Amino acid sequence: MTFIRNHLGLILPLFAILFAIEYLLVFDRVIKDYETRLQEQYTVIVVAEKSVEPNQIKHANVLVNSVESVDAESVLLRIRKQISKRNLEKIKAVIPAFYTVKLRHYPDKKRLEKLKRDLLSVKGVKRVQIFEKVHDRLYAMLLFMKTNFYIFGALIGLIGFLLVMKQMVIWQLEHKERMQIMALFGAPVWLRSGVLFRLAFVDALIAILLVTGGMVYLISDNYVKGILTEMGINTTLLLHLNDLTYLASAGFGIALFCAMWVVVRFREEL
Amino acid sequence: MRNVIEANSLKLAYPRHEPVIKNATFRVETNQFVFVTGASGSGKSTLLKSMYGAMDISGGDLSVGGIDMRSISGSKLYKLRRHIGIVFQDYKLIKEWSVEKNVMLPLIIAGFPKDVCRAQAIKLLNHVKLSHKSDKYPMELSGGEQQRVAMARALAHNPFLILADEPTGNLDDYSSQVVWELLERANEELETTVVVVTHHIPEMFNAEYRHLMIENGVVYDIH
């Protein structure tokens, strides 16, 4: 029982911290994916009196990724049958040039307004449509999601950290006596703290495996898969091989820090 | 004969307190058996602590095994302790280790292979008549049995010096007798120097011994 309690004392807070890290990693990817999709779907329309060199529009603002001119023929094709050829020619002569502008990333409101000003400053451009209302609503939603996920992750991490701190104090009390006795018989630091480091290593390994195992389960479970797909979340975003490196670094790093803390704070009291 | 312990005008004091030992000048030679006596609070245990480096020296000189204890550093101190056997009144056994592993401790620290450590532990547990309890944990033993385990541990690595702090203070007659016999044998057969802090020198003690007495912070060489 004591054995289980000793191990759970570190495994649980480590699990909480690693889960928070994995949670932040996953939702960072999900939000980035969502942001990319928003950015891909979002287009700014530039209207110019006459044809403008696309490079002029592209260099107007760093946000601009690509510029494509909208073929006037495709617009006129729809009304061709309803009007005479002469009128069509007249319309063709006065129809402005349209350009669709794709952006490098999904901008905030301030950057979007600057983009609009920059594009309007291009010679010949008379109107820029940025669809503010749709943009602002989606951007607010994105910000809300980001903030909530980070706050939640930080809270779990903080609780885990506090539990780890508590475990460090417990360890200090539990191992002090043995370390004192070993020091009396001349045991070097590595030998008298060996048990502590072994304990920390095993606990970190178990916590890492639990978090990774949980994520693998989520990916492979059909029910969870279905829910995520319905929510439009790509399940391949859930666990990346890189995550294992982050989890292992954090898990072993924290456990090692705990053991080091106990060793460094050890003072011979006889 | 070589001096194992040498104290010259030794002064020992706890921080922000009057010195407990004001003046101690004595020599302990190889293979001697020394009793240190004195009233409660006279500084017997403090003097012993200074001999294994658990007490800072406030003044004078002290050397143990030829090593100056005033300027001894961490690693040097641990090296010295690997050649000393210490016995405490409260046994100081590792409670989460078995009796056998407790006895093996000094040998594990010295880096002996596991089978050598185990063989030596079994031999010593036989000497203290506790071989049948080698798998037990300290909490499962009586006080007398725990002290016999502590004795076996102190002898495991054939130390050149045994320091014992009231080793029979809490023991019944039988366990006390076993402890004194073991200390006598170690002194006679292994030529180990033994320093024992005690309230009374046991009446049934047969071997030749020296007697240091502490009174008012001064160490007197009585006999």
Image (tube, coloured by chain):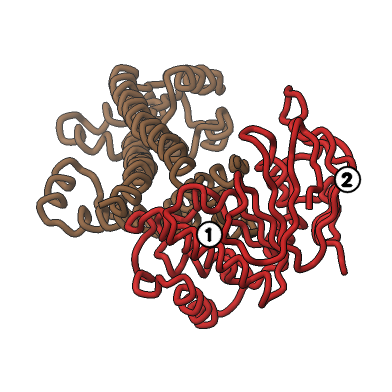
Chain colours: A brown, B red
Report the residue marked by disc 1. Answer: A194
Q: Is B176 drawn above or below residue A39 in the view shown?
A: below
Q: Position of residue A40 (x, y in %)?
A: 35, 40
The chain letter for the residue carrying disc 2 is B
* Dot 1 crowding, Cα within 10 Å, few <14, some 14–19, many 20+: some
Given the image, on which type of amino acid does mark 1 rest? Gly
Q: Residue at x 74, y 39 (%)?
A: B214
Q: Residue at x 60, y 42 (%)?
A: A270
Q: Residue at x 38, y 71 (%)?
A: B134
Residue A9 visible in image: yes
State the residue in front, B73 or B94. B94
| Front: mark 1 or 2 | 2
Q: Position of residue A224 (x, y in %)?
A: 14, 49
Q: Is A197 drawn above or below residue A25 in the view shown?
A: below
* Dot 2 crowding, Cα within 10 Å, few <14, some 14–19, many 20+: some
Report the residue marked by disc 2. Answer: B61
Q: CA distance from mark 1 to mark 2?
A: 35 Å
Given the image, on which type of amino acid does mark 2 rest? Asp
Q: Is A25 drawn above or below residue B58 in the view shown?
A: below
Q: Residue at x 65, y 42 (%)?
A: B45
Q: Position of residue A103 (x, y in %)?
A: 44, 35
Q: Quadrant of residue A28?
A: top left
Query: Mark 2 falls on what kind of element?
Result: strand
Q: Is B4 drawn above or below residue B21 in the view shown?
A: below
